[in-house]
Amino acid sequence: MSMSASEPPHLERIVDIIRRDLMLGPDVVIEANTALLGGEFDLDSLDALLLMQSLEREFGFKLPTESFGPDVFKDVVTLARFVNDNLTARQ
């Protein structure tokens, strides 16, 4: 995946975490606009919680569960922006 200037930082790390947590092989294409809810991967609530916990560990922030909902998991870039916004808020 190649990053453009408009994509949030850490997008590639987040894709790697998605790939690992959802146990996707290296041949599965994950683009910035890949839908997470209702898309090919169709995350359920447990998948979303696992993914958020992994992101919290990876990036060193902790969020109350109510701070993220389905809108955060719209697609990969939306999730990456959410992570970036929370990292920025900590600084």
Image (cartoon, helix red, strand yellow):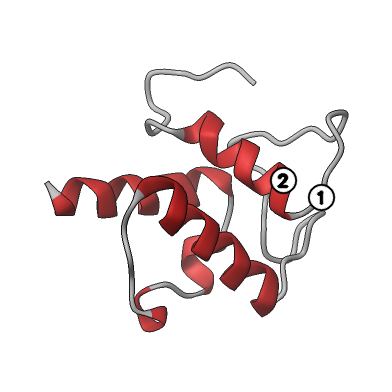
Residue 66's place in the image compared with 87, above or below, is below
Q: What is the CA distance from the residue labelled 1 to the residue labelled 2?
A: 5 Å
Residue 77's place in the image compared with 54, above or below, is above
Direction left: furthest residue: 91
Q: Position of residue 38 (x, y in %)?
A: 74, 66
Residue 55 vs residue 9, the one in the foreground = 55
Direction bottom: furthest residue: 66
Direction from residue 27 to residue 53 in the image, left or right: left
Residue at image coords 16%, 53%: 90
Quarter of the figure that contains the N terminus: top right
Dot 2 amino acid type:
Arg
Crowd class of label 1 (few under 14; some 14 to 19; many from 20; radius 10 Å): few
**Residue bearing the label numbered 1:** 23
Dot 1 amino acid type:
Met
Crowd class of label 2 (few under 14; some 14 to 19; many from 20; radius 10 Å): some
Direction from residue 26 to residue 9 in the image, left or right: left
Residue at image coords 79%, 57%: 41
Q: Position of residue 48 (x, y in %)?
A: 61, 68
Q: Position of residue 43 (x, y in %)?
A: 72, 66
Residue 40 falls in image quadrant: bottom right
Direction from residue 24 to residue 14 in the image, left or right: left
Q: Secondary structure at mark 1?
A: loop
Residue at image coords 67%, 77%: 46
Q: Secondary structure at mark 2?
A: helix
Residue 12's place in the image compared with 34, above or below, is above
Q: Which mark is residue 71?
A: none
Q: Position of residue 88 (x, y in %)?
A: 19, 46
Residue at image coords 46%, 18%: 4
**Residue bearing the label numbered 2:** 20
Residue 25 falls in image quadrant: top right
* Callouts 1 and 2 close, C-beta under 8 Å: yes
Residue 19 falls in image quadrant: top right
